[in-house]
Image (tube, coloured by chain):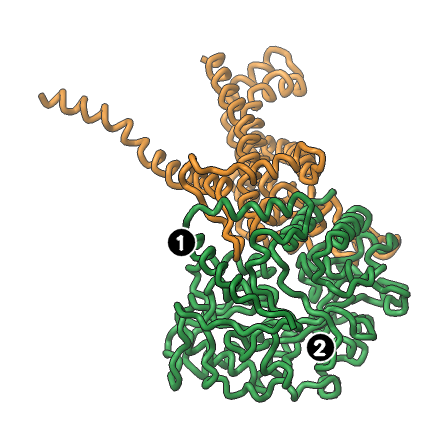
């Protein structure tokens, strides 16, 4: 009897452990997403032009989604450049993040020795200052008569008047890299730190050079961490709008996040923001699925 | 004077109420999307049902039945919190502190970037803002959506300080819901150390925003209506509230050209960014021009700042208002605050911080310059009562035209 009771307890215990996660998902992901859909496929109040959500899918009206879709793929595709720009900015920024973060994470994990803890704390330090403050600091540094141009002019030797804040894509990408690179370093570090030292020693013992050990052992073993960290950084970058707002403010550097922000705040267009949200979701689900499949095959081969 | 179309406005009330009650409002989308199709001025649907005040069409708003005015003779409740919703840096912190001290009331200030954003959040209804500072182009919507509380004039003992023309304004006959807050013109600001040409001496100063030698060195106001009114003025169309499809098409063409060739920054922070040197030229509100002096680095002299407004006065002049929102919990304190805004001394404190003039008789260009509030080279940014005789205000637009302009703005801001 007692034994059966205990077994029944564990049978219930494991699913019970999943409840907080499921409640969390339901309350903070599924329900809000349904609200977004109800607004996207809902109506607009005629006087204040505020969205009027329609909860029953039977009455959903797809005109707002069609409007957005038409202006992405149709003839008058004025949303398209911003979407392409987002892909390019996020792609370049993620790549730069990786180029910066990988060596840093590698060094911290393998060679920092007793400084590992301190170094890690230093890498997390940027999180202690709000993202907004860090971007505003760049606004100061990058002004035409700011410190950055002064440094470039080598103390007045050269005449440098680059208008970094005048709607330059480079500045926006730099801002994204600067803002998100810590998010890249941490998962990379976690991945590299876990790597069995014995495997690397074995490779060296068997005659592989340092470079070959990296290329044939370290890199393949860290690929999963690389994919994870690129996802962790690029997905929030996709929705970013204040980096370009603060560092450029020009429509010529608008990203999809700006399109969402603009339509949310414009009476009568709020529903369109839902269409963009839906698009981002679809676009970011794809690499997620790939990642899950990838890690599963990696686990299979490992075992 | 056109008649006030009472029958039509009555119909709109019914339509609105049924919609606000949460019914299906898909039908409301029809006029909007029709307008989005490019045929901007069809007056079908929502367009005909709105009461839109204009200088030649003054309006007396009905008193709200749902939100009665407060009774006379009350005092603000000590320890309560007065919630104010305003643009950033548009209210003097010292004035706020003084008020808190005098009445034992806490003031909580929230800020917005533009009227569209503000309206979106006010309509949410649960933020309990007591005071809001709209322009009159959104007044009609606020009244018709029953979001305002009528003012009790017994509390507004300082109203006699106002310019006579603002005591019974066209947008709100009898000042039932509003008190004017500030007046301003919209013109062009620039720095002589960054822009070599004298913008004011150009044949058509507005052309500077399409002059590629300034590309990447300029900013446009992040306010759809103000930005596009400038395009109309540039082309000699002084009806900046035009609903003519040809005008709208022209605005679209030139806005996209501006976006394409000039790389403008779109912002409302000119008062800090122009002094900081982020660009040399910008569309600007007069109050922001006056305000630049407080944000200039110490190494620069205010002499480098310029502000241009058409000399014949045919440019955009507007005034902002202060209203008491029905959702607020402290209407009495709100009335006291409004009355303080009309007090000459307090208004002077406030002006010293915001740079935006109140329409009070005590404030003239001469007194403002002689008291040192406005440097002489920015005297063009002071607004006179006469400016309102020839200047053109932004008005609320009929729904279809409004949607057409909004779509242009959307296209402009999406970037090419």
Residue at left 51%, top 41%? A40
- In the figure, the shade used to draw chain B is green
Looking at the rendered image, the quarter that the C terminus of chain B falls into is: top right
Tell me where residue A2 sits by quadrant: top left
Residue A172 position within the rendered picture, expressed as x and y whole percent measured from the top left:
69, 45
Residue B327 position within the rendered picture, expressed as x and y whole percent measured from the top left:
42, 66
Mark 1 surroundings: few (<14), some (14-19) or many (≥20) residues within 10 A: few
Q: Which chain is tinted orange?
A: A
Q: Using the rendered image of the protein, determine whether residue A113 is visible from the camera's viewpoint.
A: no
Kindly identify which residue carries mark 2: B388
Q: Using the rendered image of the protein, determine whether residue B336 is visible from the camera's viewpoint.
A: yes
Residue B35 position within the rendered picture, expressed as x and y whole percent measured from the top left:
64, 47
Count of numbered marks: 2
Tell me where residue B48 sits by quadrant: bottom right
Q: Chain of mark 1?
A: B
Query: Compared with residue A97, is residue A258 higher up or lower down, i.e. above or below?
Result: below
Q: Name the element at disc 1.
A: loop
Going by the image, does A208 lie left or right of B289?
A: left
Q: Are marks 2 and 1 in contact (CB under 8 Å)?
A: no
Residue A153 position within the rendered picture, expressed as x and y whole percent measured from the top left:
84, 53
Give the alpha-carbon distance from disc 2 to disc 1, as whole Å.
40 Å
Front in this rendered view, residue B358 or A86 = B358
Query: Compared with residue B57, is residue B224 higher up or lower down, i.e. above or below?
Result: above
Mark 2 surroundings: few (<14), some (14-19) or many (≥20) residues within 10 A: many
Going by the image, does A221 lie left or right of B80?
A: right
Kindly identify which residue carries mark 1: B21
First of labels 2, 1 by sequence position: 1
The disc placed on residue B107 is none
Front in this rendered view, residue B291 or A208 = B291
């Amino acid at each position: 009897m007692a034994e059966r009771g205990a077994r029944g307890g564990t049978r219930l215990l494991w699913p019970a452990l999943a409840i907080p996660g499921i409640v969390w998902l339901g309350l903070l992901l599924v329900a809000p997403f349904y609200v977004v859909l109800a607004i996207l496929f809902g109506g607009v109040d005629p006087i204040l032009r505020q969205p009027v959500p329609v909860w029953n899918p039977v009455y959903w009206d797809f005109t707002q989604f069609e409007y957005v879709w038409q202006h992405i793929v149709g003839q008058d595709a004025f949303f398209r450049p911003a979407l392409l720009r987002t892909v390019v900015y996020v792609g370049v920024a993620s790549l730069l993040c990786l180029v910066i973060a990988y060596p840093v994470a590698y060094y911290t994990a393998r060679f920092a020795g007793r400084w590992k803890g301190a170094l890690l704390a230093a890498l997390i330090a940027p999180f202690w200052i709000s993202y907004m403050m860090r971007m505003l600091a760049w606004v100061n540094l990058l002004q035409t008569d700011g410190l950055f141009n002064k440094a470039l002019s080598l103390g007045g030797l050269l005449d440098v008047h680059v208008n970094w804040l005048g709607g330059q894509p480079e500045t926006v990408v730099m801002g994204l890299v600067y803002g998100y690179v810590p998010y890249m370093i941490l998962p990379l570090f976690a991945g590299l730190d876990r790597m069995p030292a014995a495997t690397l020693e074995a490779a060296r013992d068997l005659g592989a050079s340092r470079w070959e050990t990296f290329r044939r052992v370290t890199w393949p073993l860290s690929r999963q961490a690389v994919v994870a960290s690129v996802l962790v950084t690029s997905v929030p970058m996709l929705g970013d709008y204040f980096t370009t707002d603060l560092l450029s403010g020009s429509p010529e550097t608008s990203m999809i996040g700006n399109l969402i922000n603009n339509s949310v705040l414009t009476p009568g267009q709020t529903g369109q923001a839902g269409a963009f949200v839906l698009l981002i979701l679809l676009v970011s689900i794809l690499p997620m699925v790939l990642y899950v499949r990838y890690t599963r095959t990696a686990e299979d081969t490992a075992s | 004077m056109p008649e006030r179309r009472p029958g039509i406005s009555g119909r709109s009330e019914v339509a609105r109420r049924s919609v606000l009650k949460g019914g299906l409002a898909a039908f409301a989308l029809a006029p909007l999307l029709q307008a989005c199709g490019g045929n901007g001025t069809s007056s079908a649907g929502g367009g005909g049902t709105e009461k839109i005040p204009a200088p030649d069409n003054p309006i007396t708003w009905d008193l709200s039945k749902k939100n009665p005015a407060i009774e006379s003779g009350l005092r603000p409740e000590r320890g309560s919190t007065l919630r104010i919703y305003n643009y950033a840096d548009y209210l003097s912190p010292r004035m706020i502190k003084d008020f808190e001290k005098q009445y034992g009331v806490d003031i909580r200030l929230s800020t917005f970037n533009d009227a569209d954003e503000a309206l979106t959040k006010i309509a949410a209804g649960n933020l309990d803002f007591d005071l809001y500072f709209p322009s009159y182009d959104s007044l009609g919507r606020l009244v018709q959506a029953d979001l305002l509380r009528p003012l009790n004039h017994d509390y507004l003992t300082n109203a006699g300080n106002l310019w006579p023309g603002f005591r019974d304004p066209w947008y709100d006959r009898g000042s039932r819901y509003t008190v004017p807050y500030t007046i301003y013109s919209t013109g062009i600001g620039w720095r002589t150390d960054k822009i070599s040409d004298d913008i004011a001496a150009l044949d058509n100063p507005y052309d500077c925003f399409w002059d590629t030698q300034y590309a990447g060195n300029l900013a446009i106001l992040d306010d759809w209506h103000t930005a596009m009114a400038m395009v109309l003025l540039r082309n000699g169309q002084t009806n900046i509230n035009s609903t003519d499809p040809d005008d709208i098409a022209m605005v679209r063409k030139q806005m996209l050209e501006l976006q394409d060739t000039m790389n403008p920054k779109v912002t409302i922070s000119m008062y800090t960014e122009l002094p900081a040197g982020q660009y040399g030229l910008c569309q600007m509100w007069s109050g922001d021009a006056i305000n630049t002096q407080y944000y200039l680095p110490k190494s620069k002299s205010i002499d480098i700042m310029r502000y241009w407004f058409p000399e014949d006065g045919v440019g955009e002049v507007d005034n902002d208002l202060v209203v008491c929102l029905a959702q607020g919990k402290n209407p009495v304190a709100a009335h006291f605050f409004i009355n303080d805004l009309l007090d000459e001394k307090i208004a002077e404190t406030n002006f010293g911080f915001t740079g935006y003039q109140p329409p009070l008789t005590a404030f003239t260009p001469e007194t403002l310059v002689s008291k040192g509030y406005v440097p002489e080279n920015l005297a063009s940014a002071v607004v006179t009562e006469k400016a309102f005789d020839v200047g053109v205000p932004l008005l609320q637009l009929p729904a279809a035209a409004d949607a057409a302009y909004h779509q242009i703005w959307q296209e402009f801001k999406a970037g090419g």
